[in-house]
Amino acid sequence: MEKEHEVTRRNFLRTAAGVAAASAMPVLGAPAILAIPNPGEVVNFGFIGTGTQGCDLLRQLTTIPAGRCVATCDIYPPNLRKGVETIGTNPHTYEDYHKLLERKDIDAVMIATPLYLHAPMVIDALNAGKHVYVEKSMFFKEEESELIRQASAARPQQVLQTGLQRRSSVLYRVAMEMIRKGALGKVMFVRAQWHRNNDWRRPVADPKFERLINWRMYRDYSGGLMAELASHQIDVANWAFGAEPISVMGTGGIDYWKDGREVCDNVEVIFEYPEGRKMVFTSILYNAHHRFDEQIMGDGGTLIITVGEGMYYREKAAQATTGAAKEDWWAGATVTKEAAQKGIPIFPEKTNGEQGFFDRELRYAKRWLASLGIYEYEEPHDPLWSELVNYFTSIREGKRVVVPLEIGAADALAVIYGNRAIETGQKVFWPERSAPPPPKQT
């Protein structure tokens, strides 16, 4: 293990400045693009950022034989030690990620650092000839989008994947297939929320590490609730609508936790999509009664989904149009009156003591999904595990990336514009669109 030295706030900020400066410099003599390994070969990877999220990923990676962790990197020694303990492969360790990128035996890198470092590290890793997985959001600043596009376009054989694990979930894929096959009718509205009742703060033994450990609380490093939580659910709305937003308005504030933080402890935003479709997102840090889910609503039905479970509700008006409100109001399945009232458990994880009802109605749901040509309806693995498997499969077999650049970039831009709307109190329009002209004075 390389020598560990004390990380002070000054060193932390100096390192960050060096990262940004290095990334702004032109790349001369970048290594050749790595060839895609043979399907049977193990992908050697380096891992940058072994904090809480990084170790969550490393725990999943211990059960994926397609990849082998040969190096880890973190500027905070306790995190560096924790990463080594978590992965258990005795990797080489670094405090400077550039040293890790210089290694010729590393095929791929995974980045789980504070948000403001994502884009510089992605660009440097691509320029070093590595495949890249980066946690959401893909980038922190609007101008970084084009820089990543340029770096990726120059190296088309390299995999670039963003960590939006709902895209690797069977549950969410089935939900989207239900939408495409008309189960919800015309989908016009998504309501999403992610509520907690805590201060979102992590304990810090020494005050000099405050910004290093609690970087999410400070605007120089973090996109706040929009980046850390909303990004997942914005991506669900983009997926459901098959489009990016065209405008956003919002509000928020530091209204409850008066502890020196610089990012909001509550946000409320409305995204507008083409054809008048809308997404409403809320996040608060002082009540967790209804924690988080996505409610996707069409004129024919509603799908309420969250990680591990989901319910489908048929609109009464849609039932009536079939002429069979009590039964057989979807093709190939008879649905009881009780099910029509309570909803259909498409992806049950919890039964709430109603095992008989759930068992019976799940059979109806499976029969109906099969009639639509949807045969997957159970989550075989943690979606976080599945997205990592998908990353290695893309590298080893050349298969399409589950979350390619365009999806990751659309999600990151929505986070940035959402925060801008909250900060300015004004409606923000996507670049290719402009605000409508003001009404003429009479």
Image (cartoon, rainbow, N blue to C red):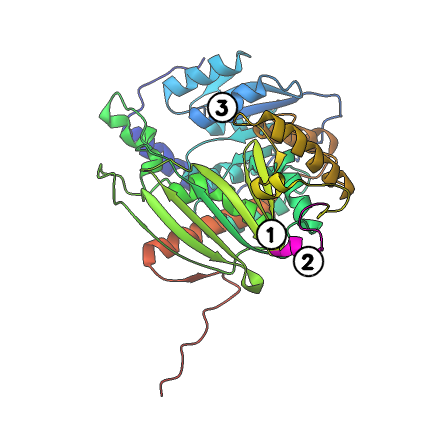
Q: Residue at x 40, y 80 (%)?
A: 439
* Mark carried by residue 315: 1
Q: Residue at x 28, y 24 (%)?
A: 204
Q: Earlier in the sequence, mark 3 or mark 1?
A: 3
The residue nearer to you, when weighing 193 against 332, is 332
Q: Earlier in the sequence, mark 2 or mark 3?
A: 3
Secondary structure under the numbered disc 1 in the rendered image: loop
How many other residues sit within 10 Å of disc 3, few (<14), some (14-19) or many (≥20)?
Answer: some
CB under 8 Å between discs 1 and 2: no
How many other residues sit within 10 Å of disc 1, few (<14), some (14-19) or many (≥20)?
Answer: some
Secondary structure under the numbered disc 2 in the rendered image: helix
Q: Position of residue 28 (x, y in %)?
A: 55, 40
| Residue 207 placement, left or right of 362 | left
Q: Is residue 320 magenta?
A: yes
CB under 8 Å between discs 3 and 1: no
Secondary structure under the numbered disc 3 in the rendered image: helix
Q: Residue at x 60, y 39 (%)?
A: 338
- Marks 2 and 3, how far apart at CA: 48 Å
Type of the residue with mark 1: Glu
The residue nearer to you, when weighing 141 against 360, is 360
The span shown in magenta is 317-327
Residue 388 image-quadrant placement: top right
Q: Residue under circle 2?
A: 321
Q: Is residue 432 above or below residue 294?
A: below
Q: Position of residue 247 (x, y in %)?
A: 47, 60
Type of the residue with mark 3: Asp
Q: Position of residue 145 (x, y in %)?
A: 51, 49
Q: Is residue 409 visible?
A: no
* Mark carried by residue 56: 3
The residue nearer to you, when weighing 433 against 120, is 433
